[in-house]
Each structure stands twice: as C-alpha cells, then as structure tokens.
Amino acid sequence: MDSGIGATLQGLHKVLMVVHHLTAATRLADVAPLVERDRRIQTVYTVAPTSPRAAGTARHLAASGAVIIPFAQAAQTPFDLAVAAGDGALDRIHAPVLILQHGAGPATVARRWDGAGPAAEPPIAGLRREGIVAGGRVIPSVLAFAHHDHRALLARVCPEALPVVRITGDPALDRLLASVAFRERHREAFEVADGRRLVVVSSTWGARALLGRHRELVRQLALDLPSERYRIVLAVHPVTWGFHGYRQVRAWFDDCLRLGVGLLPFHEGWRAALAAADLVIGDCGSVTSYGAAAGVPVLLGAFPADKVVPGSVSDLLGRRAPYLVPHRPLLPQVEDAIANPYPAAPLCDRLTSEPGRAAVLLRREMYSLMGLDEPAEPPPTEPVPLPELIPAQREPSGLS
C-alpha cells in the first residue's frame, strides 16, 4: 500500500486487520472502531490464506466498504499494528501483532485430522501452538484474553507466550450487555412487543451442531409453537453461511420464513436477538453461552460433550442447562425452560474478568503497540444496532 499516491491525509499510522474467516470478521468489527475513527490512522484489511473456512470473507469485507489488499502484498508491507481474531500466517506480517479470541473464549477442541499416524491430543480451538510460535519466536506482541482462567490453558499449550498475555475482557459480551438496556426497542424490532415470547435458535457449524443433528427442528418449532404467543428467530453460524453459500442457506430456510421465522444475517443481529429473547435453543456454540450469560433461559438442542474443553464455559453450561428432546412435544419443553431459567451469574463471571472494560483495555494495548498517544475521550461500549432480518424470497410471478 503506497500512502503517497492518492492519499488525502498524510503521515498516517497504518493498521492491518488480518481476517482469517467470517467469524473472525465479526469479532474484528467490534474492535476496528477503536482505531479507525482516529484521523491519524488508516485501517486496511487482508484475508489470510490459511483457513479452509475463509469462503465469502473477501466478499463480506468488500461489501462493508473496507480497503482490502492481497495477503502477499500485506506480507511485504510494514504496518504499525496488525490485529487478528484467528491464527495462521501471522509470522509473515511485518508489524506488532495483537491476537484476539473470536468466540466466547477457548471452549472447544478442534477436529482431529485424518491420517495414518497415531492419534494425539487435539488442539484447543483458538490456542494452537503452531499459531502462536514460529521459528523459535512468539508471534504475537499481545495475546488478548477475556478471562484470567485462559492463562492456564495457554500454559499447557505454549508457556513461552505467557509474558505477552493481557486480560482485556470480551468486547462482544460487553456490547451485548450494553444492549440489554434497550431490550424493549429490540423486542419491538422483532415484533414481540405485543407480549409474545421470542425464541432464538442458534447453531454453530458442523455435523454435530444443532442444525447438523436436527435439520427440521426450526420448521417443527414454527409448526408447534402458537404464532400468536411465540416468535422464532434463527442465528446460523458464519462458517455455515460461508461454506454452503448465502443463496443456499436462505433457500433451505425459506419455508420457515414463510411460517413466520426470522432469519438473522451472520454478521450482526444475534446480540440484538439475545437482548430481546425469552429463550435460546442452542448447542456448544458461543451464542448459547453469551445468551445464558445475559440471563436468557437456555435449552440445549445438541451438545457434543467430547468436543468441549473440560472446565470451560461451554462445559459448565452443558453440565447444568436442560436438554431439548426433539421427538417429544416441543411446546411444554419450551414453556418449562422459560419458567425455570438457568442462573446467569456463573456464566458471566466465567466469560470475562473485566466486565464492561474491553473497549478501554483493548484500545490501550493497540495504541501502546503503535507508540501513539490515545485520544483523550474514553472509548464507548456501544449497544448493537436494531436488527435487520433477511426477508423471504419472493414468489415467482407468472408470465402474462
């Protein structure tokens, strides 16, 4: 990137957002405003060539209006700071690197690769040793964790990186909890201000996720829950959107949309839904844990217990929250879960050690790495915008 050609503002500090996949893009969207509003800074994006789950990422970034450069160019250009919410190829970046988690902390183990060699302990998602060290050196200058407990997991995987750990809180949780104050506005946007109950169905990605295990559950809920008393909203993991494609996911659930189900876009809306919700039906994905932390009752529709890290937030939720039984009548199970909610405090305490302070702490680390004075005004924790649901497809018109 040649800042001397076409630049209106000169002498800018350059920040590179390294985006590994759509999930990482959603987390970086919470963090980028901490620097990109500063008229001393130019923010640039690149898509790392390391993740098989990166489909659709460049298209999403382009739609947001971001400046995107090829990774080969990013790897040859010096920057004042690089920020990532994933790992892989960051050793090729010429800048101090800050790495964030892209979900509710390190809570699941990655899939063990197929092969002829003997099995080994699978890596913890987001804490792969090969993503933290390379060539005898720790890659990140700052490894940002939401909770003190995450240090113990890192000590097992890569103790050399402990000196760069900073506890910075969880920006996604902070924005969710800030949005709860606007619950009634979000409920109006979801058309449940008339006393109806809002049920959020959330699925992570993969064959053992909620939609992988029970692909007809959303339709069955729409048929079984009286529409005058219930509204259903579906949040599908970004990887599912990226892998299967926007057109396909929308087509799969178009019949549900015609039954009154709301479909959320992958990049925003899930926190608005949780702020407005009366129940979350989910799995081991982060959205379920965030919902429980916000005080929303939870029903687990799928939960691969062997995939979660023992002692993690997901493990705690899986051992204590009630389970949905799909082949039994759904309405009584939904009503019982709403009437007997899982207590939120233990989950919230395990998700962040710095509640409400992620924006302040993350911005401090980012400006410190750039060697740049912070703006005088403290960064706000911004509530999320009102939701915009994906509409049902139009019926084809007949030829006249």
Image (cartoon, helix red, strand yellow):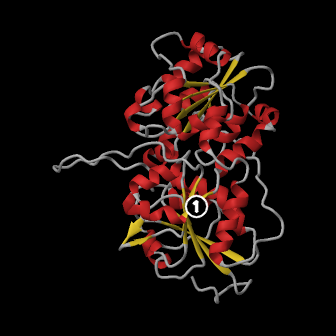
Number of marks: 1
> Which residue is rendered at x = 67% and y = 39% of the image?
389
Residue farthest along the right direction in this orientation: 377
Amino acid at circle 1: Leu
In depth, the one of 250 and 50 nearer the eye is 50
- Residue 95 in percent (x, y) is at 54, 77
Q: Position of residue 119 (x, y in %)?
A: 23, 46
Rendered residue at 76%/26% (across/down): 192
Q: Is residue 321 left or right of residue 156?
A: right
Q: Quadrant of the C terminus?
A: top right
Q: Residues within 10 Å of mark 1 (few under 14, many from 20)?
A: some
User: In the current view of this chain or complex, which residue is farthest to the left?
Assistant: 116
Whether 154 is drawn above or below 298: the answer is below
Image quadrant where residue 32 sits? bottom right
Q: Which image quadrant for residue 130?
A: bottom left
Q: Residue at x 61, y 17 (%)?
A: 337
Residue at far bottom of view: 4
Q: Quadrant of residue 78?
A: bottom right
Q: Is residue 301 above or below residue 117?
A: above
Which residue is pictured at 52% across the width and 32% down the height? 316
The residue where tag 1 is placed is 61
Residue 286, image x and y in percent? Answer: 55, 40
Q: Do we see residue 291 in this rendering?
A: no
Q: Is residue 179 left or right of residue 64?
A: right
User: Is any atom of residue 244 visible in this view?
Assistant: yes
Does dot 1 land on a helix, a strand or a loop? helix
